[in-house]
Amino acid sequence: MSSPAPTLTAASPRLVSLDALRGFDMFWILGGDAAIVALGDMLPMAPTKFLAGQFEHQAWAGLAFYDLIFPLFVFIAGISTVFSLERMKARLGTAGAVKRVLQRGTLLLALGIFYNGGLTRAWPDVRLLGVLPRIALVYTATGLLFCFFKPRALAVVTTVILGGYWALMTFVPIRDLQLEKTVLAARLGTDKPTLEQAHQLFDATTARVTGKFEPGYNLSNHLDFAYLGGRKYDTYWDPEGLLSTLPAIATCLLGVFAGLLLRRTDLDDTKKLRALIVSGLALLALGWMWHLEFPVVKKIWTSSYVLVAGGWSLLLLSTFYWIVDIKRWRAWCQPFVWVGMNPITLYVISGLVGYRAMANRLAGGDVRAWFNTTFNPGTGAFMISCVSLALMLALARFLHRRELFLRL
């Protein structure tokens, strides 16, 4: 549970920029997003409304800043895999590293199901997949690949995953049925179609189509509906579903390539930085070109989405690497480092206890109402969001100062 915290000094071999970037990413998940949205409601002007809009997921195709949060974390996990598994292989050998990967993946998967509610409800109302389960599956697959394949082979694997996923989604026939409530309601003649009715209609549909990428009308969503047991986040399918886990592995492998670059001793910092920036811009260009044929969609983690999100992840990494590890301007990022050293712990606590729920206990009710009536409407919600963030950061700082880090 506990291990020594890295010192933020020039002698430290740890990439402080990686901890800071991970903390920056988690900051928005753990309450920063709500603060920005509340700011947009409190000050409904064009700039703040635009900023708030960037902290809402795109309904389907396209990309907002908030759609980068999850793939950025997966990308960072790939970078960390390089450093952690190299040390593990040197200490325990390949067999020991494989065992550790499988153990950690299993624990993350179990923790994810627990985070989703565990067995509080009876089957089939138990969600098996989600954010932590996807991280578990992706980490396990990437870790095993890293243990057995060299970088060139990993590049081939990544290309095959992205191209193969596109081919499956484009050419495999699916039933000519959109799994969407209004569509199903019209087909079934009822305002509230049940899952049983949806399955009956699905099984009875004999017409087939190909090349569909719409909500509930694509191979990934149809496979979830047919084969993914338990509760699905979007009723009929899951944004962290079965087939879309494959391209998420490619996202993690992009992080592995970045980690391999950063680990190299034959390149100086300037060359590493240049390679990160050029690679990021190249992935962005390729991804948006592919978008014209295979749309950028987070909810089915399309191959074009992998490239675009990977491009932005590389550019963010290069920015943090230049500021934090090359220029060594570190005082500003200490709160991000606190969060980045304990991301899973802070995330699970957020789901089980809720920093916002605690903030409401401290500053809700009449206090919130006073802010709304004394200042702009919406000021109370913004204040609650700030208190929530302060509680989260206080806990992160406490854990960091006590050198308490959850190591699965």
Image (tube, rainbow, N blue to C red):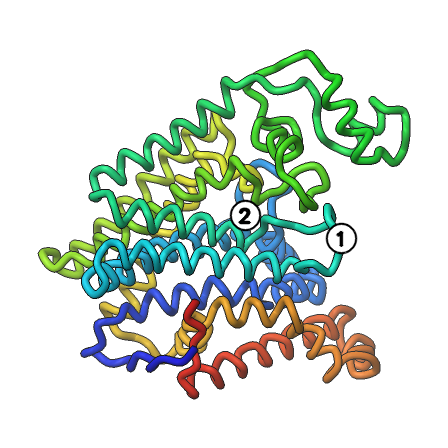
Q: Amino acid at mark 2?
A: Ala
Mark-to-mark CA distance, 2 and 1: 36 Å
Binning the other alpha carbons within 10 Å of mark 2 as few (below 14), some (14 to 19) or many (20 upward) gives some
**Residue at the left extreme of this rendering:** 266
Q: Nearer the viewer, residue 265 or 312?
A: 265
Image quarter (top left, top right, bottom left or bottom right) of the C terminus: bottom left
Q: Is residue 377 visible?
A: yes
Image check: 35 left or right of 372? Answer: left
Image location of residue 254, percent across then percent down: 33, 46
Numbered circle sitting on residue 243:
none
Image check: 58 left or right of 84? Answer: right
Determine the residue positioned at 75% across, 81% down: 361
Image location of residue 131, percent across then percent down: 55, 53
In the depicted structure, whether residue 377 falls above or below residue 161: below
Q: Is residue 317 visible?
A: no
Query: How many numbered marks are there?
Result: 2
Q: Amino acid at mark 1?
A: Ala
Cβ atoms at labels 2 and 1 below 8 Å apart: no
Disc 1, SS? loop
Q: Which residue is mark 1?
A: 122
Binning the other alpha carbons within 10 Å of mark 1 as few (below 14), some (14 to 19) or many (20 upward) gives few
Determine the residue positioned at 40% across, 45% down: 251
Image location of residue 72, percent across then percent down: 43, 54
The nearer-to-camera label among 2 and 1 is: 1
In the depicted structure, whether residue 209 falls above or below residue 356: above
Image check: 241 left or right of 261? Answer: right
Image check: 78 left or right of 190? Answer: left
Q: Which residue is mark 2?
A: 64
Determine the residue positioned at 42% across, 87% down: 401
Q: Nearer the viewer, residue 377 or 36?
A: 36
